[in-house]
C-alpha cells in the first residue's frame, strides 16, 4: 500500500513541474501515466527515443522518465542527446531487465535514478520525491545566487555613486584649497591647472603607469599649497627678494608638505612629496634639503621641469613672460640661473622631445592670454 502521506507530500512538492515520459509499451505507459497524473499537471509522452528528443527540443521539462529498450532510438541514446542539450537535466531510467551492459553508460550519463519494471508505485514515488526535492533546492540556490548577484550589483552601483560623489567633492575641495593660495598670486589659478596637465603629459610620455599618471596629475596641482603660509608682501613683491625674504619664500615647500602630511592615501602622500621636493635640483643646489639625483622623488623631478617651464612662460610681478622657444632654450641649455644640470637627465630629454605640447597646454589654459 502506498503511504498517503507520501502522496500528499509529493503532490504538493510537484506542483508546477513538468514531465516527459518515454515508453514504447502502451499498456505500461497508460498505467504509469495514471500514477504520474496524480502529482504532475503537465506530462508529455513519447513512444521512442527519437520522438522523445523531438518533444524535448521543443519544450522544457523538469523530469525525464525513459525506458531503455525501445525501437528507432533507445533510451540511452536519447539520454545522451538530452545531456548535450542540458547537462543538469534530471533523468530516471526504467527497464524490465537487469541492464548491467548499460551500467557504465548510465553512470557516465549521470542519470538521477534507475527503476526496474514492473514499476513499483511506492518505489517510483520515493524516487520522484528525492528528485523533486533536489529540483527545488537547485531553484532556490539559483534564485538566491541571482538575487545575491543583483544585490551586489545594486550595492556596487551605490558604492560607485558614493565614490564618484566623494571623488568629485574631494577634487572640488582640493581645487578650492589651492585656489585660496593662488588668490595671493597673479594667475587666478591657471598656473596650478597647467602644472597638473604638464605633469600628466610628461609622465605618460615617460611610460609611467596609469595610477602614477593620475596621481601626479592630482598631486602636481598641490605643489604650491604652502604659499598659503607666505605673507603677501613677500609673495607679491615686484622687486627682488632680500636673503631673509627668500628664505621665507622657500619655506612654502615645508609648509605645503606639513599641510599634506600624515595621510594614508597614496595620492596625498605623492602630493606631499611634490610639495616638499619640487624645488630640489638634480645637482643638489635646490631646497629645502639639498637632495641630489634619485634621492629626489621621481614625481618631484617631473614637476620641477613643469613648474620651471610655466614660471618662465608666464608673467610675474617681478618678470615679463617669455616666448616658448626661449623658455625651452633656457631649460635645455641654461642661462646661468636655470641650468640643465638642475634636472633629471631622463626627464629633461623627454621634455625636450615633447616641449611643443607644453606650449599647446599653456595656450589652452592661460586666462591672461599669450
Image (cartoon, rainbow, N blue to C red):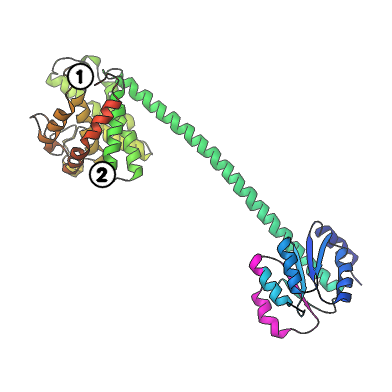
Q: Quadrant of the N terminus?
A: bottom right
For the question of whether residue 15 can be seen, the reply is yes
Residue at 81 percent of width and 59 percent of height: 13
The reply, left or right, for residue 245 in relation to residue 165 is left
Which residue in the protein does label 1 denote? 316
Q: Which residues are magenta?
A: 83-110
The local crowd at label 1, few if under 14, some if 14 to 19, many if 20 or more residues have their Cα within 10 Å, is: some
Q: Quadrant of the C terminus?
A: top left
Q: Quadrant of residue 62?
A: bottom right
Residue at 30 percent of width and 19 percent of height: 188
**How far is mark 1 from mark 2, CA to CA?**
30 Å
Give SS at disc 2: loop
Numbered label attached to residue 353: none
Q: Check if residue 3 falls in the magenta segment.
A: no
- Measured as percent of width and height from the top left, residue 320 is found at 16, 19
Q: Nearer the viewer, residue 356 or 144?
A: 356
For the question of whether residue 261 can be seen, the reply is no
- Measured as percent of width and height from the top left, residue 135 is found at 73, 61
The reply, left or right, for residue 190 in relation to residue 140 is left
The local crowd at label 2, few if under 14, some if 14 to 19, many if 20 or more residues have their Cα within 10 Å, is: some
- Measured as percent of width and height from the top left, residue 248 is found at 19, 22
Give SS at disc 1: loop
Q: Is residue 307 above or below residue 13?
A: above
- Measured as percent of width and height from the top left, residue 280 is found at 18, 35
Residue at 22 percent of width and 38 percent of height: 354
Badge 1 or badge 2: first in the primary sequence: 2
Which residue in the protein does label 2 denote? 206
Q: Nearer the viewer, residue 229 or 101?
A: 101
Q: Is residue 262 above or below residue 179?
A: below
The reply, left or right, for residue 164 in relation to residue 45 is left
Amino acid at each position: 500500500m502506498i503511504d498517503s502521506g507520501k502522496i500528499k507530500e509529493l503532490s504538493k512538492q510537484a506542483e508546477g513541474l513538468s514531465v516527459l515520459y518515454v515508453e514504447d509499451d502502451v499498456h505500461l505507459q497508460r498505467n504509469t501515466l495514471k500514477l504520474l497524473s496524480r502529482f504532475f499537471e503537465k506530462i508529455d509522452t513519447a513512444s521512442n527515443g527519437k520522438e522523445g528528443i523531438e518533444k524535448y527540443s521543443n519544450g522544457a521539462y523538469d523530469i525525464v522518465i525513459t525506458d531503455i529498450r525501445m525501437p528507432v532510438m533507445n533510451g540511452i541514446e536519447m539520454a545522451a542527446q538530452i545531456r548535450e542539450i542540458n547537462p543538469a537535466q534530471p533523468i530516471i531510467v526504467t527497464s524490465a531487465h537487469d541492464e548491467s551492459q548499460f551500467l557504465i553508460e548510465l553512470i557516465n550519463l549521470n542519470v538521477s535514478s534507475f527503476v526496474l519494471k514492473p514499476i513499483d508505485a511506492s518505489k517510483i514515488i520515493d524516487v520522484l520525491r528525492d528528485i523533486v526535492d533536489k529540483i527545488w533546492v537547485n531553484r532556490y540556490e539559483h534564485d538566491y545566487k541571482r538575487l545575491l548577484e543583483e544585490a551586489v550589483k545594486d550595492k556596487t552601483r551605490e558604492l560607485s555613486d558614493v565614490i564618484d560623489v566623494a571623488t568629485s567633492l574631494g577634487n572640488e575641495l582640493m581645487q578650492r584649497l589651492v585656489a585660496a593660495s593662488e588668490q595671493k598670486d597673479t594667475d587666478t589659478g591657471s598656473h596650478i591647472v597647467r602644472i597638473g596637465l604638464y605633469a600628466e603629459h610628461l609622465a605618460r610620455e615617460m611610460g609611467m603607469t596609469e595610477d602614477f599618471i593620475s596621481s601626479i596629475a592630482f598631486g602636481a596641482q598641490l605643489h604650491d599649497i604652502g604659499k598659503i603660509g607666505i605673507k603677501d608682501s613677500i609673495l607679491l613683491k615686484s622687486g627682488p627678494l632680500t636673503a631673509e625674504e627668500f628664505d621665507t619664500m622657500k619655506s612654502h615647500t615645508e609648509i605645503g608638505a606639513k599641510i599634506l602630511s600624515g595621510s594614508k592615501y597614496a595620492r596625498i602622500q605623492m602630493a606631499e612629496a611634490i610639495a616638499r621636493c619640487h624645488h630640489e635640483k638634480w645637482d643638489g643646489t635646490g631646497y629645502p634639503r639639498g637632495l641630489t639625483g634619485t634621492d629626489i622623488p621621481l614625481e618631484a623631478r617631473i614637476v620641477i621641469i613643469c613648474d620651471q617651464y610655466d614660471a618662465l612662460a608666464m608673467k610675474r610681478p617681478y618678470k615679463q613672460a617669455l616666448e616658448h622657444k626661449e623658455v625651452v632654450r633656457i631649460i635645455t641649455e641654461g642661462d646661468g640661473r636655470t641650468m640643465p644640470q638642475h634636472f633629471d637627465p631622463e626627464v629633461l630629454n623627454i621634455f625636450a622631445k615633447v616641449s611643443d605640447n607644453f606650449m599647446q597646454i599653456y595656450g589652452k589654459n592661460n586666462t591672461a592670454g599669450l
